[in-house]
Image: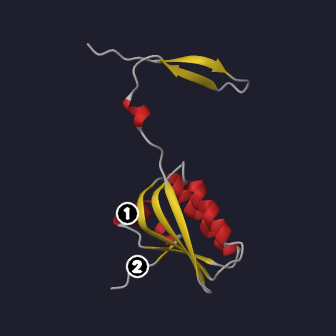
């Protein structure tokens, strides 16, 4: 027999958002760690290279956006996003790329994606976003 423990509502705030307390043993979901993204910037006279490591999703897209916005404060010719260390990107990440592309264009710069792996390449192709973004192929 399988017993499932359901969470109990402990508080509802003024906006209707509920706080839950789980009354059973810890679930496997409790052990899931949140996604992480590190962004390292290298600046040259012509470009700002943002080296990304980790996952780009709902939890981390803001970090990428903020780092790129800082690079655009003094706009270089190109803002290069190096995806060599990116292991995951969801729809929030894709949306952030589109917003950054628009922000770079407005600042007189261009957004360039490099070292895009097979996973992200396929995602860009399926969604049709490859045509909207500049993706540089690795040189042979």
Residue at x 37%, y 31% (from the top left corner): 28
Provide residue 17's location: percent of width, then percent of height.
65, 26
Provide residue 40's location: percent of width, then percent of height.
54, 68
Provide residue 59's location: percent of width, then percent of height.
54, 48
Q: Residue furthest top?
A: 1
**Would you identify the image quadrant in which residue 103 lies?**
bottom right
**In this rendering, is residue 65 above or below 59?**
below
**In this rendering, is residue 21 above or below 33?**
above
Q: Residue furthest left?
A: 1
Residue at x 67%, y 68% (from the top left corner): 70
**In this rendering, is residue 57 above or below 25?**
below
Q: Earlier in the sequence, mark 1 or mark 2?
A: 1
On the picture, is 121 further left or further right than 80?
A: left
Q: Quadrant of the N terminus?
A: top left
Task: Pick whichever, 106 or 76, lies toward us.
Answer: 76
Distance from disc 1 to disc 2, alpha carbons, whole Å, reads 14 Å
Provide residue 127's location: percent of width, then percent of height.
45, 60
Task: Pick whichever, 16 or 26, lies toward us.
Answer: 26
**Which structural element holds mark 2?**
loop
Residue denoted by label 1: 122
Q: Residue furthest right?
A: 14
On the picture, is 76 further left or further right than 28?
A: right
Q: What count of labels does the image hold?
A: 2
**In this rendering, is residue 44 above or below 49?**
below
Residue denoted by label 2: 137
**Would you identify the image quadrant in which residue 108 lies?**
bottom right
């Amino acid at each position: 027999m399988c017993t499932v423990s359901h969470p109990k509502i402990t508080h509802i705030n003024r906006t209707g958002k509920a706080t839950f307390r789980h009354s059973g043993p810890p679930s496997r979901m409790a052990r899931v760690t949140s996604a992480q993204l590190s962004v390292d910037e290298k600046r040259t006279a012509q470009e700002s290279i943002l080296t990304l490591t980790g996952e780009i999703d709902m939890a981390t897209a803001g970090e990428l956006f903020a780092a790129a916005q800082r690079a655009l404060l003094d706009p270089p010719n190109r803002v290069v996003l190096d995806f060599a260390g990116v292991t995951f990107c969801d729809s929030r990440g894709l949306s952030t790329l589109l917003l950054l592309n628009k922000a770079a264009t407005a600042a007189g710069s261009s957004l360039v994606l490099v070292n895009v792996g097979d996973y992200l390449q396929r995602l860009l192709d399926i969604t049709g976003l490859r045509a909207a973004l500049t993706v540089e192929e690795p040189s042979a």
